[in-house]
């Protein structure tokens, strides 16, 4: 097992390397293509920008629906927490972002983590179902059935895993995580609304990618756009770099093709879909959140409080947000 310090250094080195390569690749490809500034003033790019805002608000609303059964919190507070978490996921890591969300919202760490993961699971479930219906992708059907199982048979999975995780001293963390997961989906009415919002989120994000493609004269099929969203979300989480930088773009390219122009499209899509809100989140964090959560040294506190709990969460849930 690597020490927390070595993990931090390895993540930092990986992030710097991927970021440098990404900047070089986008710059070199954009130079070859000779992009025109007028392209960024096209109606398609404006549409993509507006859809990006709509997508982030839908994403926040979906989290708010699941979180409302775990904590008494208004939508504005959830939005500020989400923006701050997006910023901190880039500037530090997802664990620190989750810690600040926990302090600002007032719920427990594992319950906030559960509400975030059930939001991600909703997006993957409806997205994989749409991909199967659009492209008859049988792998997507298996992904849909897996996430459907997490919703319908979560109590059975909990009873099966609890004895195993208790043996490795992760039982209490898993119990708290499951309590948050189960409560978040406990009301059928809210769950139905969440599924509708999850469907809207996938459609909006697909619309962003299609619109960005049209900005640069590239036609992206809706099925490929949905596939790009799912690949991007998975690789962005699995790679482990802050904000999923590098993995996000790689997932998009795997779906739409690794050409020079598509590199630019992938980066522009992720900027409007995610990176822009990290910049806005910096303002939200330093203007509204930091004074209230009272974090004196964010990096030290994140390391001290989250090394154990975040490792526990990966055993109980297998995540990222």
Image (tube, rainbow, N blue to C red):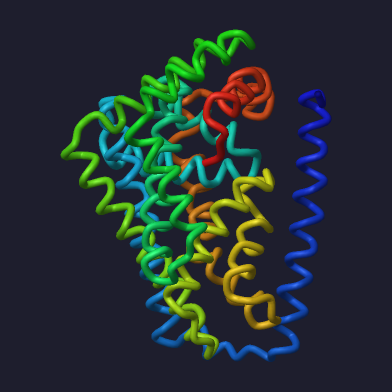
Residue 191 in which image quadrant: top left
- Point out residue 263 in the picture as x, y percentages from the top left corner: 66, 75
Q: Does residue 267 show up?
A: no
Image position of 231 (left or right of 19): left
- In this view, the residue in front, 162 or 284, is 162
- Point out residue 142 in the picture as x, y percentages from the top left corner: 47, 51
- In this view, the residue in front, 24 or 217, is 217
Image position of 157 (left or right of 312): left
Position of residue 11 relative to residue 260, above or below, is above
- In this view, the residue in front, 226 or 6, is 226
Residue 267 in which image quadrant: bottom right
Image position of 6 (left or right of 310): right
Residue at 76%, 72% in the rendered image: 25
- Point out residue 301 in the picture as x, y percentages from the top left corner: 63, 22
- Point out residue 95 in the picture as x, y percentages from the top left corner: 59, 32
Residue at 35%, 36% in the rendered image: 151
Image position of 3 (left or right of 90): right
Residue lying at the far left of the rendered structure? 189
Residue at 59%, 42% in the rendered image: 89
Position of residue 31 relative to residue 227, above or below, is below
Residue at 36%, 66% in the rendered image: 133
Position of residue 286 relative to residue 96, above or below, is below
- In this view, the residue in front, 37 or 167, is 167
- The quarter of the image holding the N terminus is top right
Q: Does residue 303 show up?
A: yes
Residue 66 in which image quadrant: top left
User: What number of labels is visible?
Assistant: 0
């Amino acid at each position: 097992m690597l020490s927390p310090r070595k993990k931090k250094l390895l993540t930092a080195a990986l992030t710097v390397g991927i970021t440098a390569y990404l900047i070089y690749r986008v710059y070199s490809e954009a130079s070859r293509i000779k992009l025109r500034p007028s392209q960024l003033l096209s109606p398609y790019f404006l549409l993509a920008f507006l859809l990006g805002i709509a997508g982030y608000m839908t994403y926040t609303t979906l989290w708010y629906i699941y979180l409302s059964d775990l904590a008494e919190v208004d939508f504005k507070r959830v939005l500020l927490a989400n923006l701050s978490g997006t910023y901190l996921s880039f500037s530090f890591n997802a664990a620190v972002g989750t810690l600040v969300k926990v302090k600002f919202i007032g719920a427990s760490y594992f319950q906030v983590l559960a509400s975030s993961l059930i939001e991600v699971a909703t997006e993957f479930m409806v997205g994989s179902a749409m991909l199967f219906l659009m492209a008859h992708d049988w792998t997507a059907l298996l992904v849909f059935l897996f996430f459907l199982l997490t919703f319908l048979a979560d109590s059975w999975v909990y009873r099966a895993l609890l004895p195993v995780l208790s043996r490795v001293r992760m039982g209490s963390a898993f119990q708290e995580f499951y309590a948050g997961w189960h409560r978040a989906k406990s009301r059928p009415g809210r769950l139905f609304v969440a599924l509708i919002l999850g469907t809207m989120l996938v459609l909006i994000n697909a619309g962003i990618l299609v619109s960005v493609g049209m900005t640069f004269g590239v036609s992206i099929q809706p099925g490929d756009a949905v596939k790009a969203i799912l690949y991007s979300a998975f690789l962005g989480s699995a790679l482990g770099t802050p904000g999923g930088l590098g993995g996000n773009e790689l997932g998009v390219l795997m779906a739409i093709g690794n050409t020079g122009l598509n590199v630019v499209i992938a980066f522009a899509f992720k900027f409007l879909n995610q990176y822009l809100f990290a910049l806005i989140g910096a303002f939200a964090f330093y203007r509204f959140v930091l004074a209230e959560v009272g974090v004196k040294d964010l990096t030290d506190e994140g390391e001290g409080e989250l090394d154990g709990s975040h490792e526990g969460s990966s055993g109980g849930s297998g995540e990222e947000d």
